[in-house]
Image (cartoon, helix red, strand yellow):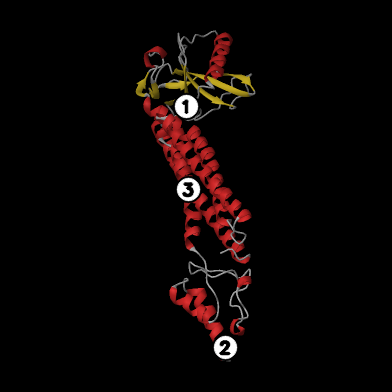
């Protein structure tokens, strides 16, 4: 009975305490031999003939949980994701793109480094240490690669859709009380946000669209003849155009883009998409030919009530997308680490 009690005691001590000098002496007193560094041999190599002892550890038995690799596996990929996502989303990408891509490249080198470590650990397992399992190395490499790829793609999309237009518009000028009958496009070529006079209206009867896969819709900005009339003036030159994509038929004056039907909308947010501008220019040329009007230097805007608020909302959306990405990735990474911990513990690698 006392022999069994001693084995249970030794087993509990081995689970709770690290291998120390006192533990080494305890096992040596039971007839087990340790190597020159005080480490215990594999379970299969224990001398079971000494004192008729029974092994306290069997091959495949679960080992003590080491929180250090868990910490690295959880927060390493998450930190990489946050840094790359931030660099690709915010002002570094806009103002210093070469520096941004350098930081992203350094992040990829970190991924490559973990891959090399995983490969070397696997090679050591196969060639030198058959009992060594580099499970966390491989998991860390795959997690880092996934984090880097997701951050690069998500950051670029967020930048393209939200923060780049925001920075473009903030770098341009603001013009209030613009009279479309008096002002010319050449006079405010640096306009980013425009507030037209209260008499400004969209001339929907002179709207048109140009189709190239998508329909690029345009409508000229005009003004009423007087404060009590809804009739619009025929201007000698139409340089200000409201635009939109796929919000008209293209072959009829049925423009319904933005806040086209709002009586309080008198503002314009400058189009910053260079890839769309040539198609809107072709639509204006069609309108010139169809309605016998002139547009010497057309400027394109999104028609709305408050272009300043819309500009700030772009920044808010960009930050919100970043925060959602950060928390989503942490949740996914936490789930993956938990699953990997359960799997590795089940197969006895922790």
Residue 205, visible in the rendered structure: no
**311 and 128: which one is in front?**
128
Residue located at (49% from left, 67% from top): 36
- Name the element at disc 3: helix
Q: Which residue is mark 1?
A: 303
Please name the residue that numbered disc 2 is placed on.
3
In the rendered view, would you say 280 is above or below 91?
above
Q: Nearer the viewer, residue 62 or 130?
A: 130
- Mark 1 vs mark 2, foreground winner is 2
Crowd tier of the residue under label 2, counting other residues whose Cα lies within 10 Å: few below 14, some 14–19, many 20 or above? few
How many numbered marks are there? 3
Name the mark on residue 281: none
User: Marks 3 and 2: CB-CB under 8 Å?
Assistant: no
Of marks 3 and 1, which one's residue comes earlier in the chain? 1
Query: Where is residue 254, by image quadrant?
Result: top right
Image position of 77 with respect to 55: above or below: above
Which residue is denoted by mark 3 in the rendering?
A: 326
User: Relative to 21, does residue 250 appear above or below in the rendering?
Assistant: above
Quarter of the image holding residue 209? Answer: top right
Q: Is the Cβ of the residue at disc 3 closer than 8 Å to that at disc 1?
A: no
Q: Residue at left 55%, top 77%? A: 32
Which quarter of the rendered picture does the C terminus lie within?
bottom right
Q: CA distance from mark 3 to mark 2?
A: 55 Å
């Amino acid at each position: 009975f006392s022999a069994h009690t001693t084995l249970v005691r030794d087993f509990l001590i081995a689970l709770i305490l690290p291998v120390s000098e006192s533990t080494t002496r305890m096992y040596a007193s039971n007839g087990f031999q340790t190597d020159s560094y005080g480490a215990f041999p594999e379970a299969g190599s224990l001398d079971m003939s000494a004192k008729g002892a029974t092994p306290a550890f069997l091959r495949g038995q679960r080992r003590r949980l080491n929180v250090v690799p868990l910490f690295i596996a959880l927060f390493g990929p998450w930190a990489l994701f946050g840094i790359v996502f931030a660099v690709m989303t915010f002002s570094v990408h806009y103002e210093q793109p070469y520096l941004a891509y350098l930081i992203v490249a350094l992040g990829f080198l970190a991924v490559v480094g973990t891959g090399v470590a995983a490969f070397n650990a696997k090679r050591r397992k196969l060639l030198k240490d058959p009992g060594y399992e580099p499970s966390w190395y491989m998991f860390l490499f795959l997690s880092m690669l996934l984090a880097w790829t997701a951050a690069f793609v998500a950051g670029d999309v967020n930048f393209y859709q939200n923060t780049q237009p925001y920075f473009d518009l903030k770098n341009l000028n603001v013009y209030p009380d613009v009279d479309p009958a008096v002002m010319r496009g050449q006079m405010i070529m640096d306009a980013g946000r425009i507030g037209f006079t209260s008499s400004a209206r969209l001339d929907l009867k002179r709207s048109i669209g140009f189709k190239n896969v998508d329909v690029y819709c345009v409508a000229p900005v005009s003004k009423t003849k007087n404060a009590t009339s809804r009739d619009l003036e025929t201007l000698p030159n139409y340089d200000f155009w409201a635009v939109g994509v796929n919000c008209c038929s293209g072959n009829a004056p049925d423009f319904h883009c933005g806040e086209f039907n709002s009586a309080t909308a008198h503002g314009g947010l400058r189009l910053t998409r260079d890839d769309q501008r040539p198609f809107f220019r072709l639509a204006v040329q069609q309108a010139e030919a169809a309605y016998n009007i002139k547009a010497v230097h057309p400027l394109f805007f999104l028609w709305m009530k408050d272009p300043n608020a819309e500009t700030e909302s772009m920044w808010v959306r960009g930050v919100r997308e970043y925060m959602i990405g950060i928390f989503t990735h942490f949740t996914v990474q936490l789930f993956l680490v938990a699953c990997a911990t359960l799997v590795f513990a089940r197969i006895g690698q922790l």
